[in-house]
Amino acid sequence: MVGVRSMLLIIAVAMICGWSACNPEVEAHTKDVQVTIEVQQVSAGYINVEFSTNKKAFYLMGIHPIREGVDIKKVEKQFMLLALDSAYVDYLYWRNKQLQQLTPVIADFASHSLQYGNANHYFTLLQPATDYWVYAFVVDPNTNKPAGKLYFQTVTTREESLQPMFFEYRVEGRWDYVYPKDSTGEINSFTPWVGETIDSITLREQGWESPGAYFLSRFKDVYAGTYTRILYGIYAHENNGVGDGTSTTNFEFGKTYYSGMASLDAPLAHPLDTNAYDIYRFTWMGDSTDLYFTPADCIGGAW
């Protein structure tokens, strides 16, 4: 008879078993696999890279700031193990949340954290004019250990954005909409950006010298890891106080609000440059409010 503890273990293994290492039908080579890294586009805050393999295999891809005085070729074993450890820690954190939520089926490490087949990837939230290693190496999905050599390229991000982003903004009733656009006026869906709305009374009560100072401080928290509201593409939100996981703003009649947005492709590296973000000011006059703003309506960083 199977004991309760053994049964729970069987259930846990079944839940965590993904489609890769637990599925013998998945073809995954670990020998004589070559990984090709082709850099497609480099900007100030992101690098677009194409990864491909000559055989079907699982591999870990990533990016890391170059460490001065370190020859990556001489420490490639340690580098690969460190990269795998970091990826596995992230996986365990994610898996723990899934187990707590009693998720029926949970992917294994290979299915969740490794790449299988060709991939086009954007590495974002990078610093301008900075040297990075873009890397990849094959991983054995059965042992979760490196299989083969480390492939890498050295890439330097640009000083300025390759494609500057601007924001158009609409307030319609309790809903507001943000339209991130590139220099041609098309919607930019792949560059990360941040945005937030706050009322003028709260700004003054908190002692901010200007709306620009507030938004700059908040947005720069992204790089400290304390600001997690990172967005892509068009954003729509109902400001009814309920919240959507990123904002709990509740529009109130007669109040003046400031909405700020900034591209993370041109990181906020120049604190005094009000062109680093767009700020719009409006007074909410109830459900009939219908306002549309373009960069010509930006107020800069002042009140």
Image (cartoon, rainbow, N blue to C red):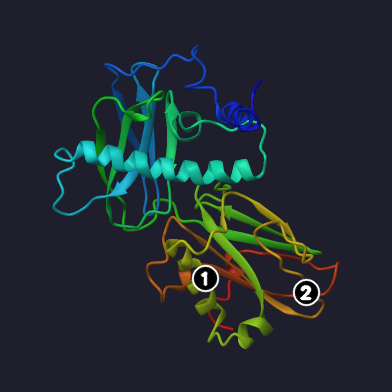
Q: Give the number of the mark in front: 2 or 1.
A: 1
Q: Which mark is residue 284?
A: 2
Label 1 secondary element: helix
Number of numbered discs visible in the structure rendering = 2
* Left-right relation of 22 to 255: left
Q: Label 2 amino acid?
A: Trp
Give the image location of residue 160, x and y in percent: 35, 58
Nearer to us in this view, 233 or 53 = 53
Residue 201 figure quarter: bottom right
- Residue at 41% in and 77% down: 272
* Left-right relation of 174 to 226: right
Nearer to us in this view, 194 or 143 = 143
Position above or below: 222 against 113: below
- Residue at 21% in and 37% down: 76
Residue 134 figure quarter: top left
Position above or below: 15 against 177: above
- Residue at 38% in and 45% down: 86
Q: Earlier in the sequence, mark 2 or mark 1?
A: 1
> For the residue carrying disc 1, how many other residues have a C-alpha within 10 Å: few (<14), some (14-19), or many (20+)?
some
The outermost residue toward the front is 1
What quarter of the picture does the N terminus occupy?
A: top right
> For the residue carrying disc 2, how many other residues have a C-alpha within 10 Å: few (<14), some (14-19), or many (20+)?
many
What quarter of the picture does the C terminus occupy?
A: bottom right
Residue 228 showing in the rendered view: yes
Q: Which residue is mark 1?
A: 218
Give how far apart the Cα atoms at labels 2 and 1 are. Answer: 23 Å
Give the image location of residue 26, x and y in percent: 48, 15
Position above or below: 207 against 248: below
Give the image location of residue 142, x and y in percent: 41, 23
